[in-house]
Amino acid sequence: MIQQKRYFITLSVILLLGIIVYIFLVPNFETVQFSQEVVDNIADGVTTTTSGSQNDDNVSETQDNTELPIDLEQEDQIIIQDFLLNSFAKSDIDIFDTYLLIGSDERNENSSLSRGFVEGARADVIILGLFKKDSDEMYLLSIPRDTLIQNGCTDNIERINASFIKNVCGNKVENLAASIAKLTGLKIDHFASFNFEGFEEIINSFNGIEICVDVTQREGYSFELQKGCQLVNGSIALNWVVSRHTEILVGEKQLDENGNDISEWKLMPGVSDLTRNDRQQYVVLQLLKRVKEFRSLSDLSKFITALENSFVIDENLSLNKAANILWSLKDTDFNNITKLSMPVKNYILDDGRQVLIMTENFTDFAKSQGLLDS
């Protein structure tokens, strides 16, 4: 009887220790439903309702992150014909494992103060990681947030970032994935999303990242990068990535007797969402390169802790699978990753809004870039 009692006590202690380890050492990622069937239905124009949309409750149903739909009848019909021709992929592409990285502009009081506070959440960063099956070919594909698409749920013509919203058809990511599928023919296997605060936390967990620039540049007081390479924290990296009004230094840096900057600055030419895409890809690659630094359990634990606080992932992407994916990239030469941006051009709508329109069907673009056989 005494022996049985000891066994029971020992088993209870082991069980209690297991629970404590799970609670405190195993990251508790926030997950969101991601149903490929729902995505397919939205892309095909079939209205459906997700049963698990309660997992997306961090965004209110009344959140104002929509925009007025675009009335095509008021626009240049030649331009619109090009849009209708190029904004629907000619065929599905199923030769890649496709991972979607979403950076939303959702922020709170803890986010970078220099970016300000806004209501709602839009998809500010949309990057696809494409890993060719049975091959070592890898691509980073950026989709500019202002790219015009036709929403599969509402039929509205709108910017693609506007489809990142929960509605009767699906949750935020399902709607965005459906828009991507219609535009590119690519189906999303898994996704991870982060907001401004999460972006800063991830970079700070690595004690910063290196950013190299060809010319000294700044945006107001939010960041200033010197010509060359420098290690920056998450706040500066974020402000550089999202900057729309980057200035460059003219001549040499000059300070007055009080240390105030009296240098001449001018707006950097050509800064646009495409510039932001380049910077986003740059930062993603810099972070991936840091995977090579994992040599100890403490390093890995620090990284996992940062992910727990910063990311939302789909319910089908387990922690072990995510870790295996990252670890499989450990010996990758990231200089061989092909970086791509969508073939788009600027277009000003009749009401003055600026958008981007596809200049080439993505299927043809994929062939021209070697993603598909001609």
Image (cartoon, rainbow, N blue to C red):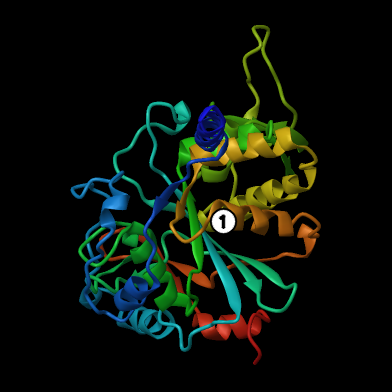
Residue 310 at what x, y percent from top left?
A: 50, 40
The answer to which quarter of the image holds residue 222 is: top right
* Residue 218 seen from this side: no
What residue is shown with label 1? Answer: 277
Residue lying at 57% horizontally and 44% vertically, measured from the top left: 241
The amino acid sitting under disc 1 is: Asn
Residue 250 vs 345, above or below: the answer is above
Tell which of 187 and 89 is nearer to you.
Answer: 187
The local secondary structure at tag 1 comes to helix
Residue 227 vs 262, above or below: the answer is below
Residue 291 at what x, y percent from top left?
A: 73, 47
Tell which of 61 and 8 is nearer to you.
Answer: 8
Q: Is residue 82 left or right of residue 62?
A: right
Tell which of 128 and 142 is nearer to you.
Answer: 128
Q: Residue furthest front?
A: 1
Residue lying at 41% horizontally and 60% vertically, measured from the top left: 146
Q: How many numbered marks does the figure carry?
A: 1
Q: Is residue 81 left or right of residue 7?
A: left
The answer to which quarter of the image holds residue 327 is: bottom right
* Residue 301 seen from this side: yes
Q: Residue furthest top?
A: 258
- Quadrant (top left, top right, bottom left, bottom right) of the C terminus: bottom right
Residue 77 at what x, y percent from top left?
A: 30, 82
Pointer 1 local density, CA inside 10 Å: few below 14, some 14–19, many at least 20: many
Q: Is residue 332 left or right of residue 76?
A: right
Residue 113 at what x, y percent from top left?
A: 45, 26
The answer to which quarter of the image holds residue 251 is: top right
